[in-house]
Amino acid sequence: MTEPTETEETRLRRAFALIGEEAGRPGPTAAPADPPVSVRTIATAPRSPRGRRRVRVALAAAAAACAAAIVVTVTVTAGDGSGKDADTTGRGQTFPEALACATAVVEGDLTAVRPAGQGRVQVTVSVDRWFKPGTGPATARLDLADPAVADPAEAYATGDHLLLLVPRRKGRIPDTFQGQEVPPMRDRITRTLPEAAHTPCPPEFQ
């Protein structure tokens, strides 16, 4: 015997509900007529476990599709997938452009950190390596936009070992790399500097 379709099940359930309503109403003392054999057979037949599994699988597939849609939405909202950094102007900045727009790219230890007022901070760096320019003093003093204004957890501290991309635009917070981020970023900078040397800095980042 084939299983009833979903539409047939819905109709049967409605029929059972109507029968139940009729049975609950006061009526003659005579026993009501038995329901048709076909109705009794379907009502008493247990639902196939295979049918229940199909329903669970369908629900699981629907849930997975919904979850995938949420992930895609979040991914699209978080970034355009181009590998570019978002800017307040809405235009992305490529990594070669970031290097082209940097006045200095330097790695070293912070030996002093002092507030400079108006959302800025002055740091003194004991330099391990200059990337841009190719050479520079062993100690550098940099006036930077203070990252603690946007997030106190990002505040610079004496003793930090950092790799800094100091932007040309004065109000822009430097791109800062620390800890395990430094070695791969150091390699990426070294590989990209030749391209960055021939990349113009877009006006909105100057």
Image (tube, rainbow, N blue to C red):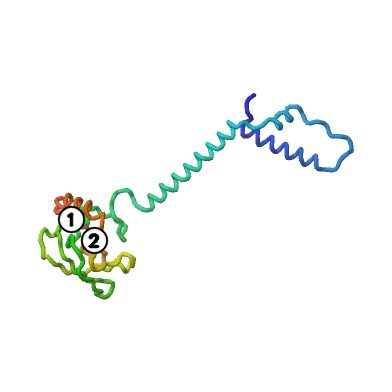
Q: Which residue is mark 1?
A: 200
Question: Is residue 204 among the parts visible in the rendering?
Answer: no
Residue 41: numbered disc:
none
In the drawing, does residue 68 fall left or right of residue 164? right
Percent across and percent down for residue 144 are 23, 68
Q: Looking at the image, which residue sits at the far top?
A: 1
Q: Looking at the image, which residue sits at the far right?
A: 29
Q: Looking at the image, which residue sits at the far front?
A: 159
The residue depicted at 31 percent of the width and 64 percent of the height is 154
Label 1: few (<14), some or many (≥20) within 10 Å? few
Query: How far separated are the C-alphas under marks 1 and 2?
Result: 10 Å
Residue 205: numbered disc:
2
Question: Is residue 159 among the parts visible in the rendering?
Answer: yes
- The quarter holding residue 13 reads top right
Percent across and percent down for residue 96 are 20, 53
Percent across and percent down for residue 57 are 52, 36
The residue depicted at 79 percent of the width and 40 percent of the height is 22
Quadrant including the N terminus: top right
Label 2: few (<14), some or many (≥20) within 10 Å? some
The residue depicted at 11 percent of the width and 63 percent of the height is 136
In the drawing, does residue 150 fall left or right of residue 161? right
* Secondary structure category for the residue under label 2: helix
> Is 36 located above or below residue 88 in the figure?
above
In the drawing, does residue 51 fall left or right of residue 197? right
- The quarter holding residue 106 reads bottom left
Q: Amino acid at mark 1?
A: Pro
> Is 22 located above or below residue 172 in the figure?
above
Q: Amino acid at mark 2?
A: Phe
> Is 187 located above or below residue 5 in the figure?
below
* Secondary structure category for the residue under label 1: loop
Front-most of 205 and 182?
182
Quadrant including the C terminus: bottom left
